[in-house]
Amino acid sequence: MAMKKNDFAEVEYTGIIKDDNIVFDTTQEKVAKDNDLFNENSDYGPVIICIGQEHVLKGLDEALIGKEPGEFKVELKPEQAFGNKDAKLIQLIPTSKFKKQKIQPMPGLQVNIDNVFGIIKTVSGGRTLVDFNHPLSGKEITYDIKVNKIVSDDSEKIKAYLKLGFGIKDCNVEVKEGNAKVNLKQELNDAVKEGMNKKLTGIIPNIKKIEFVIEKEQKK
């Protein structure tokens, strides 16, 4: 069965910078360790994404539409991945600005200037050239991706979307007759809950209403 927008799919993938053959992203723990990418705080293993919601790079997301579960390779041009280099984002900054922050500028150093991250390209005299483009901008990207299955269970869909879309990992979901109850460990403000409700009922047709319950309330 071919995938379409708003379908949920369990996927595994590895992203590679095409020209350099360097792995920069993966869902597989062994690949991460083999390529010095391992982060003990990351959750490795298959991940459930919602097609068309940009839970992965936009170009990869679009490439999944119409595909059936299985393994395939996706090649992305810069504009489909991290964008082309923008000359306006390469700026000369007085070296004195770094020294005031007790930073010794040197090529390759990542810096935070006015809450924007950049990479120093050159240091010459009193001026430092900083590139504020994404480090992978201008790069062609290849993804090796495996779609294990299309997810049909609505409770799994809700849990997956809350994790990827809102960063909520620890929750239980019960679905009955189109109504979903989401048990959370922390309170959310009404505006956030309203936004989640609208988003989830919009992309999961079987779900008509979602109730958010804090676990401590159930124990009373």
Image: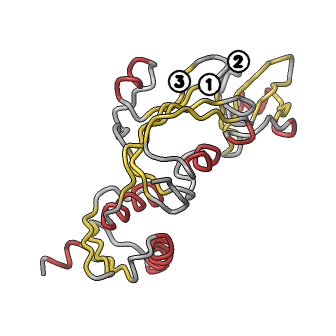
Q: What residue did someone put label 1 on?
A: 17
Marking on residue 116:
none
The quadrant where residue 184 appears: bottom left
> Which circle, 2 or 1, is nearer the viewer?
1
Residue 106 disc label: 2
Q: Residue at x 71, y 18 (%)?
A: 107
Residue 105 position in % (x across, y down): 71, 22
Label 1 secondary element:
strand
* Amino acid at circle 2: Met
Figure quadrant of residue 133:
top right
Q: Identity of the amino acid at label 1? A: Ile
Question: Pointer 1 and pointer 3: residues touching (CB < 8 Å)?
Answer: no
Residue positioned 81% across, 38% down in the render: 89
Q: Using the numbered discs, state the Cα–Cα distance from disc 2 to disc 1 in whole angstroms.
A: 25 Å
Asked whether, in this view, residue 52 is left or right of residue 69, the answer is: right
Q: Earlier in the sequence, mark 1 or mark 3?
A: 1
Which secondary structure, mark 3?
strand
Q: Residue at x 33, y 77 (%)?
A: 212
| Dot 1 crowding, Cα within 10 Å, few <14, some 14–19, many 20+ | some
Above/below status of 201 relative to 46: below
Front residue of 199/204: it is 204
Secondary structure of the residue carrying numbered label 2: loop
Camera-side mark, 2 or 3: 3
Q: Which of 120 and 165 is in front in this view?
A: 165
Residue behind mark 3: 23
Residue 5 image position (x, y, % from top left): 55, 61
Report which quarter residue 173 is drawn in.
bottom left
Q: x, y percentage for residue 59?
A: 64, 44
The quadrant of the picture occupied by the N terminus is bottom left
- Give the number of callouts: 3
Q: In this view, does 120 lie above or below 116?
A: above
Q: In this view, does 134 lie to the left or right of 91?
A: left
